[in-house]
Image (cartoon, helix red, strand yellow):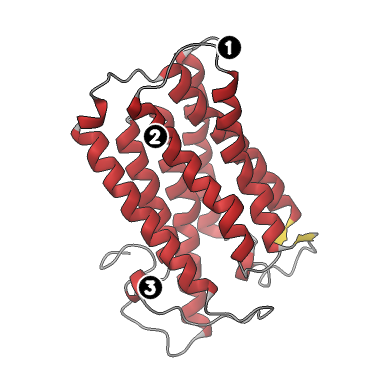
Amino acid sequence: MQCTEDLDFYLSAVLFISGVLYLIRQLALPAPYGKHVENDKKHRYIMVPAKYAWFIQEVPSFLVPVLVILHSQQKWGTLSCMMLLFMFCGHYFHRSFIYSVFTRGRPTPLHIVIMAVAFCSYNGFLQGHCLVYGAAYDKEWYKDIRFASGIMIFIIGMGINIHSDHILRNLRKPKEVSYKIPQGGMFKYVSGANFLGEIVEWFGYAIATWTLPAFAFAFFTLCSIGPRAYHHHKYYLQVFKDYPKERKALIPLIF
């Protein structure tokens, strides 16, 4: 495989455009999975148990970059590049092999799983290809302020994401499907604390990586799960009369 900057550019452009289109779509209706499936009375979906759904849809983002690395015939691998690949694959290792095992979420419609597999395969290839073939880091990149600050933001975002998932998971007992008001952590300030963590995480990754594909992915993440936090917030306000009025949907004090 030859390194082609044009390939990364065009794949990133598709990701940006897809993010805008997905944002427009979700401004009207939330994606039909989780709590929002029950509000969709027009369709009858084939459902996949949550544990299997999360593993199947997330694991391509871990495996595809690994396959790109193994397929590489050229010498590469500065310390900075290896750390960035470890960050990306580490996130999806957790989502595929740890989060999927412990999740107590509701079943996911099959078509959502298929779409997620397609996206994770596409994005996994794009990020892996860019770092292996496209990005050129000097040996001192790990000392650059963009790299250092990006990693710090990534770690903070990942911590918020994992802690928020822990809070949500422990709201339910095994086999329980009812919804409750999440408390603690960033849920004190926003309804979509888990989404906020992931958005922060990927913008941190984009800053550390400083590549167009990474920023395209961060933008797509904002467009895809940002509106979901808003719809979650609306749901909580409608269902729970005692829901904290001071909470925002996604950004404390603003939104």
Q: How far apart are marks 3 and 1 (CA)?
A: 45 Å
Q: Position of residue 41 (x, y in %)?
A: 73, 70
For badge 1, the amino acid type reads Met
Q: Where is residue 141 in the image (x, y as percent from the top left)?
A: 25, 26
- Please indicate, yes or no, whether residue 31 appears anywhere in the rendered image: no
Snapshot quadrant of residue 26: bottom right
The residue type indicated by label 2 comes to: Leu
What is the quadrant of residue 194 in the picture? bottom left
- Does 96 appear above or below 180? above
Residue 198 left/right relative to 207: right
Rendered location of residue 253, percent (x, y) = 25, 68
Residue corresponding to mark 1 = 1
Lower position in the chain sequence, tag 3 or tag 2: 2
Q: Mark 2 points at which residue?
A: 84
Q: In what element is the residue under mark 2?
A: helix
Q: Which amino acid does label 3 sit on?
A: Phe
Mark 3: which secondary structure? helix
Residue 134 shows which numbered tag? none
Q: Mark 3 points at which residue?
A: 187
Residue at image point 47% right, 17% down: 133
Residue 185: give x, y in percent of width and height.
Answer: 35, 72
Distance in Å between CA atoms under marks 2 and 1? 21 Å
Foreground: disc 3 or disc 2: 2
